[in-house]
Image (spheres, rainbow, N blue to C red):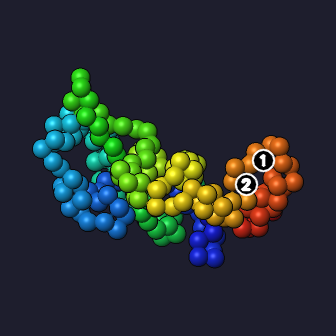
Amino acid sequence: MRMTGGKKELLFGPYAGFTTKFLKHGSYLDMIKSVRPSNLYPMIKAGLDNVDLTKYLVKEVMQSPQDRLKSLRKFVPNARLEDWELAIAGQRVQIIKSHAEKGGVLEFGTEVIRDNEGSIAALLGASPGASTAVSIMLGMLQKGITVIKPELAKTRLAELIPSFGKKLDQEPALLDQITAQARTALRIG
């Protein structure tokens, strides 16, 4: 259940998909443009070692609306197709790494990639969702993106996140305050 644009919505998302875009609004040529002589062999090896995953993705992408409704009805038995709309909720870019013995390995973890100057970074991987993204990005900011002065980043983060750098199990009043703010923002009792 989510509040989206001021209205309550129920989201259901077991459906997998596939695109050659690296960003939700990217180009269909993103994957093709990323192929280099140095990464072609690892990509092919990772693909061959994960044929079952490829078959699964193809099966998911080829589902009809009725197939998706059948999955949904396992959780919402009286669901009707006309009451639901298919929407792309997010985008993941899978990491393929060169491997000395296997040629190429599909990574299922989450990884921060940044340039040498520390001026840009990205969170990539199998599940860079809400459960990991904030923690990883805060850790990265603490380590310092060089275009932001570390003391400025910490001050600004403390303003944005009252619990930043604090142990809530040692500050019950702050925990109560943050819990109340979250309940108000999420409109839950």
Report the front residue among 57 and 93: 93
- Which residue occupies the extreme top position in the image? 101
Please give the name of the residue rendered at 18% of the width and 57% of the height, measured from the top-left corner.
Answer: 33
Q: Is residue 60 above or below residue 97?
A: below
Q: Quadrant of the C terminus?
A: bottom right
Dot 2 falls on a residue whose secondary structure is: loop
Tell me whether circle 2 and circle 1 mark residues in contact (CB < 8 Å).
Answer: yes
Query: Which mark, residue 163?
Result: 2
Distance between mark 2 and mark 1 Cα atoms: 7 Å
Query: Which mark, residue 168?
Result: 1
Number of marks = 2
Please give the name of the residue rendered at 51% of the width and 61% of the height, measured from the top-left corner.
Answer: 148
**Three-letter amino acid code of the residue under disc 2:** Ser
Residue 122 lies in quadrant: bottom left
Q: Is residue 82 above or below residue 118?
A: below
Query: Mark 2: few, some, or many residues within 10 Å (few <14, many ≥20)?
Result: some
Place of residue 164 in the rendered image (x, y in percent of width and height, measured from the top left): 69, 54
Place of residue 129 in the rendered image (x, y in percent of width and height, measured from the top left): 51, 51
First of labels 2, 1 by sequence position: 2
Report the front residue among 94 and 120: 120
